Each structure stands twice: as structure tokens, then as C-alpha cells.
Amino acid sequence: MNLTQDTIEQLAEHLENAELRREPVRKITDTHPEMDWDDAYAIQDAIRARKQARGTRIAGLKMGLTSFAKMRQMGVTDPVYGFLTDYGACMDGGAIDTAALIHPKVEAEIAFVLKHPLKGPGCHIGDVLAATDFVLPAVEVIDSRYENFRFDLKSVIADNTSSARFVVGGTHRGAEGLDLKNLGVVLEKNGEVVATAAGAAVLGHPASSVAMLANMLGARGRELPAGTFIMTGGVTEAIAVAAGDSVTVRYQHLGTVSMRFV
Ligand code: OOG
Ligand code: MG
């Protein structure tokens, strides 16, 4: 760690205020180029603590930048993790208020709910599938607090990996008998197909994203408890949305997830 506790707290407040006031800011590595990975996750943890102190509940965890499409789009090379909040959960088929967001984008994702805890290091797809209660279709609405979505990995980790809203579909299936690698995903905006992918777009198999999360948390002495809801990362590049847009994502074997932006 290179930053003092005071600086970590101050950067957490700065980034959380950007979210709450919807005022984008410059990426924080411009002013704090010395910050390291532990500093970045410490800032994210401090944002989480600020929210929890005000009564926010943590709804789950997310992996980000797990597909080559996303890494290419954002110009980065490694996956990251963040947390989901209770106020971020939106209804399938409902309306999402863009007035509370800066520059939202949607991502089609496959989500897992665990029935057993997972603790890295050494977690692999087999451990994840054995620990999975069921999988669900989900859409993440990301909203970077950085101007023009311009960031580097440390800045985006500190900004809770652009986490903002998410919508979970109602079709849940056990992982057994589901070919998650070949599972097709079709993303439509205003009735037009704008992106397509298969589950394998995420690190070769969405379960490897969960394994990587368990291993990244394990390196920090943490584990994934039974019952954890995990979003594994966008299978395609993220698609910008604005008030008036509607989005439907069709998942092979897992139904659809839809929302409109107002
Ligand atoms: C970072 C978050 C990426 C995903 O699913 O890849 C993410 C960003 O692109 O703003 O959530
Ligand atoms: Mg995402």
C-alpha cells in the first residue's frame, strides 16, 4: 500500500460523491499515480463501508472485464471485482431512471447463486459447479463515475468497477444439464439485435469467472459465503443507453431479461 488511510478515505468520499451527485470526475490515478492494487481495493472497500454505515445492504458481487470484448472496449487486460447494492437491484420488465445516472451502458451477463462457500486459492470450474445452487440471466447497467468512461484498472477498481444497477431474470436452472459454454445470448436495443455472444466469451466458461473471484478474494483472506449472488461479467461489449431506449436480452434456456430507460 502506498496511500495513507486518510487519502483512501478522502478518495472514497470523492468517488462516492461523484456517484451520488452524478458528477463525473477525472480518473484518480492522474492525481495519485503511486497508488497500487491494494490501495485501489481499499478505496472500493471504504466506499462499501460508507454505504453500509448509511444502511445499504450488499446484494452480491460482480466480476468485470472478464470477456475479450469488454477488455478490448475498455483497453485493459485483467478482470476486476466489485460489489452490488440493494438500491441497484431493478425489476425485470421495469423502468430504470436515467436521471440518477451519468452515462449508463448495459451488459448481458450470466449470474450464479452458491449453495456452498468457495474459498481460493486453487478454485476451479469443477469446484464452482459443485458449489452452485442455480444460474440466472442478468443485465448489468454500469455507470462509470469517470468522465467519458476513461479509466485504467486501478481507477475502475476504486470506483467499484462502474457498478450502478442490475436486473435479474426469473428463470433459474441448475448448472447440471446446462451447457454454459455454448449458451447463446442475444442483446436487443429498441427491437434491433446489437450484440450476440455465447457463455464462452467470459474466460472460456462463466464458471471460471466465479473461480477467479474466489481466488482473488482468497488472496485477500476472504471467501464467498453460501447464498452469494455473483454476476460473471458482460459477454459482449457494453451498449450505451439513454432515456427512451428499451433493452431485451434473450438467453438460450434461461428466458429473457428486459427493461426500459426513462
Ligand atoms: C467496468 C465494469 C465492467 C463487465 O461486466 O465487464 C463490467 C467498465 O467497463 O466500466 O462490469
Ligand atoms: Mg458487468
Image (cartoon, rainbow, N blue to C red):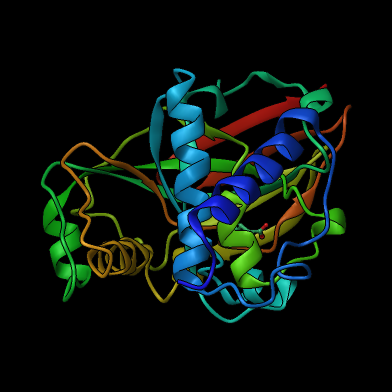
Looking at the image, residue 165 sits to the left or right of residue 209; the answer is right
Residue lying at 72% horizontally and 78% vertically, measured from the top left: 75
Looking at the image, residue 54 sits to the left or right of residue 178; the answer is right
Front-most of residues 193 and 244: 244
**Horizontal and vertical percent position of residue 111:** 39, 47
Looking at the image, residue 41 sits to the left or right of residue 157; the answer is left
Looking at the image, residue 7 sits to the left or right of residue 147; the answer is left
Quarter of the picture holding the C terminus: top right
Q: Looking at the picture, does residue 112 appear above or below residue 206?
A: above
Residue lying at 69% horizontally and 76% vertically, measured from the top left: 33
Residue lying at 81% horizontally and 34% vertically, measured from the top left: 22
**Horizontal and vertical percent position of residue 50:** 50, 32
Residue lying at 84% horizontally and 33% vertically, measured from the top left: 245
**Horizontal and vertical percent position of residue 52:** 43, 27
Quarter of the picture holding the N terminus: bottom left
Task: For ligand 1, give the image quadrant.
Answer: bottom right
Residue farthest bottom in this picture: 77
Count of marks overlaid on the render: 0
